[in-house]
Amino acid sequence: GAVVSQHPSWVICKSGTSVKIECRSLDFQATTMFWYRQFPKQSLMLMATSNEGSKATYEQGVEKDKFLINHASLTLSTLTVTSAHPEDSSFYICSADAGQGTEQYFGPGTRLTVT
Amino acid sequence: GQQVMQIPQYQHVQEGEDFTTYCNSSTTLSNIQWYKQRPGGHPVFLIQLVKSGEVKKQKRLTFQFGEAKKNSSLHITATQTTDVGTYFCAGFGSGAGSYQLTFGKGTKLSVIP
């Protein structure tokens, strides 16, 4: 149990376009999901906390208008990278909270390459 | 695909006892990272191991990367109540799998005062 999926696993897009990444909890409901970014060989950096039915909470330095997060249901959160630039190329990983901050399950990640 | 198994899932120790969590990958890893998540918090990066057989220490924490780069361990000496939390390992594959970071399911540590 407690599986989190992400789609797509790998995407290449052109500069200026937008890319949507989905994070799904497959067998449990997640009122809270987290989005992280990771540069090669570096640690995870929390971008935002996504709460079902409300606005996401962004970490300092993360542009809200560039990284749009929507948590429309208890099993789905989406991260849209708008007007992507090459510097947005990174590994984006989500995690889902199975309840009350006690259990967190990670998705497999999405590698974004902006050309 | 790449799988990372972490054991044990739960560990309860008396304060002052040692604690070890183990991470095993189905494939060779290019590097492995360890994170600690306090209850209600987010995973916080602890360390990254890159070299085969590497051992690193942070105060009471000792991290080890296996010779084959397929397993790793985190050992805490003389646990304290502040060590409570879930410890995750996460590894990047090598070669064709180098783009994927795979997390273990974590080991939840409880420390009894």
Image (cartoon, grey):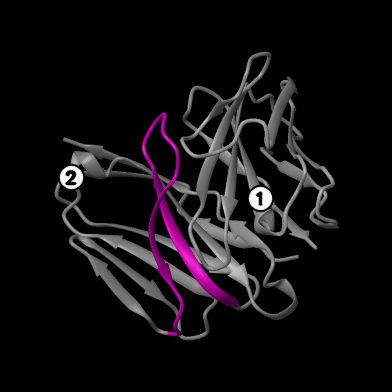
**Looking at the image, which is closer to me, A57 or B42?**
A57
Left or right, residue B51 beside residue A114: left
Q: Identify the magenta region.
A: B29-52
Q: Quadrant of residue B83?
A: top left
Per the rendering, the mark at residue A92 is 1
For the stretch drawn in magenta, what is the main secondary structure? strand
Give the number of marks: 2
Residue B100 % position (x, y): 68, 63
Judging from the image, mark 1 belongs to the subunit labelled: A
Please indicate whether residue B30 sits to the left or right of residue A74 in the image.
Answer: left
Residue under the image location 25 percent in, 40 percent down: B111
Disc 2 target residue: B80
Q: Is residue B30 above or below residue B87?
A: below
SS under mark 2: loop
Q: Nearer the viewer, mark 1 or mark 2?
A: 1
Q: In this orientation, which residue lies closer to the viewer: B65 or A14?
A: A14
**Neighbours of disc 1 within 10 Å: few (<14), some (14-19), many (20+):** many
Residue B91 counted in the magenta span: no
Q: Residue at x 58, y 66 (%)?
A: A40
Report the disc number at residue B13. none
Amino acid at the residue labelled 1:
Tyr
Q: Is B38 one of the magenta-colored residues?
A: yes
Q: Quadrant of residue A91?
A: bottom right
Q: Position of residue B105 (x, y in %)?
A: 55, 49
